[in-house]
Amino acid sequence: MLARLERYLLQDFPFIHLVIGGFGNATFLVGSVFFLFPSLERIALWLFVIGSLGMLTGTIGEAFVRHKRRSRQRATTSQR
């Protein structure tokens, strides 16, 4: 099951990590701006945390995609 999920997320939709990372960046930025207003500090905190998790998820996902791509390239070149 894990292999199927990995294939689904890494091979079929490698761009999804960029979308998650972009969402994380935007949320982080909005949260940072909200910190300038004392009445919005609680919302800012949650946007900040959610944005950080989005950026982390996007980065980890992109690292997995690149690792898989390099592994496939090495396997292809070693077979020649």
Image (cartoon, rainbow, N blue to C red):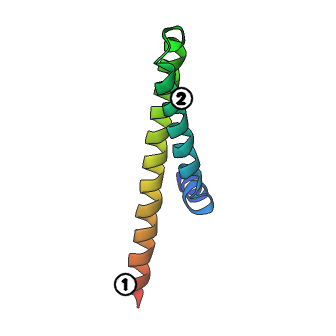
In this rendered view, identify the residue nearer to me: 45 or 5: 45
User: For the residue carrying disc 1, how many other residues have a C-alpha within 10 Å: few (<14), some (14-19), or many (20+)?
Assistant: few
Above or below 6: residue 39: above
Quote the CA–CA distance across marks 1 and 2. Answer: 47 Å
User: For the residue carrying disc 2, how many other residues have a C-alpha within 10 Å: few (<14), some (14-19), or many (20+)?
Assistant: some
Q: Amino acid at mark 1?
A: Ser
Q: Earlier in the sequence, mark 1 or mark 2?
A: 2
- Which residue is drawn at the image coordinates 52% and 25% (left, top)? 47
Above or below 29: residue 1: below
- Which residue is drawn at the image coordinates 54% and 58% (left, top)? 10
Q: Secondary structure at mark 1?
A: helix
Find disc 2 in the rendering and name its residue: 30
In this rendered view, identify the residue nearer to me: 58 or 6: 58
Above or below 15: residue 57: above
Give the image location of residue 4, x and y in percent: 59, 56
Cβ atoms at labels 1 and 2 below 8 Å apart: no
- Which residue is drawn at the image coordinates 39% and 84% (left, top)? 77
Q: Secondary structure at mark 2?
A: helix
Spot the residue most to the top.
39
Q: Amino acid at mark 2?
A: Val
Residue 78 badge: 1
Give the image location of residue 67, x and y in percent: 40, 62
User: In the visual, does 47 lie left or right of 63?
Assistant: right
Above or below 34: residue 50: below
Give the image location of residue 9, x and y in percent: 58, 54
